[in-house]
Image: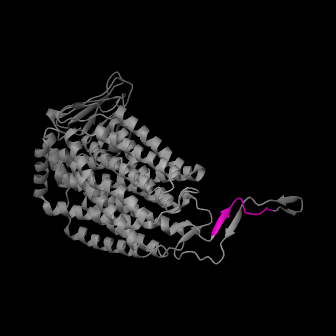
Amino acid sequence: MALGEDKKLYDGFFSILAKIQKNPFQFMLAVWLVMCVGACNKFFLFPMPWIAGQSECRKEVLSPPFKSTSVASGTFTYTPAAWIQVKNNCTEKAEVFTFVTEKFTLTTSNFVFFGITKAIFNFTVGVLSDIFGRKWAVVIGWVLSLPMPFMVLYANDWWTVATANIFLGIQQALVWSATIFIMIDYLGQEHSGTAVGINETIGYTVIAIVTEIAAAILDEHHPRRENYYVVLAIIGSSIVISTLFLKESKPLAVDEESKITGRSKETIEKSKETSLVWPSGRKTQVEVARSAFIYTSFINMSLVSICFAGLMVNFITGFVWGLFTKWMKNGQANRWKPLSKGDIANIVLCYGLFKGVLQFIFGFIGDRYGRKFVIIFGQLFNVLGLVVFVGTGLDENDPRVGFFFGAIFLGLGTAMMYANNLAAVCDHSDPSWRSSALGAYRFWRDLGYAIGALVTGSVADWIGIPWSVGVTAILVALSAVLLLICYKEVPAGGVVEVSADTKLSTEGDVGLKAQMTPSGSQMLLMGGLDVAPPMVFFPPPPQPFPTMGMA
C-alpha cells in the first residue's frame, strides 16, 4: 500500500522530521514511555522460567532401576505405573515453585493469562481512545499495573504469579497501544508505517537490551527479587511523568480526517454510529467501534489475512519467551545439556535485537514501496528460523550456534512483519476510527500469546518440544499463503479491493456508501485521497445480502 509512495526516500525522510519538529517534546515523551513499557515487560517476564519448573530433588520415574513389585489387597492387585525418585541430601532453590513432573501447559500458563488479557484490552483501549482520547489510557494503564510486582514478590504459589500477568497484559495493552496511536497522530496516516516502526523499534530494542540486564541481576535461587524491584520503580516514575507532562493527541487525528474528507471537525466528532440496513429496509444502529471490529476481523479480507499473520507473530513471540526458553533451560534428553542463563539471554537477545532495531527500516520501506511482500518475506524468514531450531535441537550436541542463527532469522522476519502489519490496518481505515481498527488487529495479534502457549505447550507435552516448533512453522507458512492470496495494497489515491462481496463508492459529505454484491469489490477513494473516508452503507435493491453503513 504505500500511502507515501508518491514521496521519494529523501522527501519522505524530511517530511517525517518536519512532522516531529511540530511537537518534539510530546513525541519524545511518547518515545520515553515506550522505552519504559518495554523495559517493564522484560524485567517482569524474564525470570518466569526460573520461578516455576521441574523439581531438582523429586522426579517421576516410569522405569525404576529395579524390578517393581505388585501388592495384593483383597480381590485386587496393585501395580505402580510410576515411581517418585527422591534425591538424597537435596535442597530445592528458595522462592522457586517446583513440580514433580513439569507440564509445559502449566508452567507457561502465565502467557495464557497475559495474552488473553492483553488481547481484550487492546480492543478496549482502541475503542475508548477514539472516544475519549489517548492520554487517559496511558495514565490508567500504569496505575492498574501497580499490583503485579507485589503479587510476584509475596506469592505463595505459582498460580498467584501466573495471574499477576493479567495486570501486565492490561498495562501493555493500554500504555503501548496508546503510544502507537499518539505517534501515528503526530506523523500522520501517510507515515503510519514509520510511526509504528519507530515505536516498535524503540520498544523491542529496549526489551532486547534489558534481557541482558535482567539476566545479570537474576538470582536463580531467589528469582522473585531484584527484577521486580526495578518493575516497581518504573511503574511509579511513569505514573508521575504521564500524568504531569503528557498531552492529548486525539485532536490531531480529527484534524487530519477533516482535511482529508472535507468534513467539519464537529461532524467527525459526532459520528458515533453506523447503520445496518437490510434489504427489507429494516435499520439497526451499530456503534462505530463494533462496526470497525467486524470490518477488520471478518469483512475486509486484506485485514483478515493481516489479523491471522499478526496472531502468528505473537504465537512465535510467546514461543521464544516461554517454551523455547524452557527448552534451553532444561536441555534435550540424550542430546545436549541445559544452557546457562547467560547463553539463554544472549540467544533471546539476538531475536529481540533484530526484531527491534530493524522495524523502523522496514516500516519506512513499507510506506514507500508497499507492505504485502515485505510481510510475506518476513513470514518466510520466520519459517526458516523455526526449521533451524528443529534441526539444531535434534541433531547437534551443542545447539548454541544453530539457536543463534535461528533467533536471528526469527528476529529479522518478525521485524519485517510487525510494523507493516499495523500500518496495513491504518491504510484500510480512517483517522476517526483508526484506533478501533488497530485495537481489533491487536486483539487478534496478542491472542497469539495465549493460543501459542496452549498449542505449543500441549504439543510439547504430547510428543516433545521439537515437534511443537514444527507445528508452529507449518502454521506460519499457512498464514503467508493466506496473505499472498487475500491481501490487496492501497496505493496513494488509488483503488483497492476490500473483500470478495463488498462494493464501496463515494457519495456526498458523509463520505462513503457501500453496496453488498456477490461479484467482487472495490474501494474508491474520494478525489484521489490517501485514505478511505468513513463508511456509509445502503441496500442494493436486487441483492439478498445485508448492508452496513454510518449514521
Residue that protrudes farthest toward the front in the picture: 397
Image coordinates for residue 522, horizontal then vertical, percent: 27, 29
Residue occupying image coordinates x 58% and y 53%: 461
Residue occupying image coordinates x 39% and y 51%: 405
Image coordinates for residue 278, horizontal then vertical, percent: 36, 31
User: Bounds of the magenta span?
Assistant: 58-68
Image coordinates for residue 18, horizontal then vertical, percent: 10, 53
Specify whether residue 66 is painted magenta: yes
Considering the whole magenta stretch, tell me its main secondary structure.
Answer: loop
Query: Toward which corner of the image does residue 490 lie, by quadrant?
Result: top left
Query: Toward which corner of the image does residue 202 lie, by quadrant?
Result: bottom left
User: Which image quarter holds the C terminus?
Assistant: top left
Image coordinates for residue 364, horizontal then vertical, percent: 21, 47
Q: Nearer the viewer, residue 195 or 519?
A: 195
Q: Is residue 80 above or below residue 392?
A: below
Residue occupying image coordinates x 68% and y 62%: 61
Specify whether residue 303 is painted magenta: no
Q: Nearer the viewer, residue 75 or 279?
A: 75
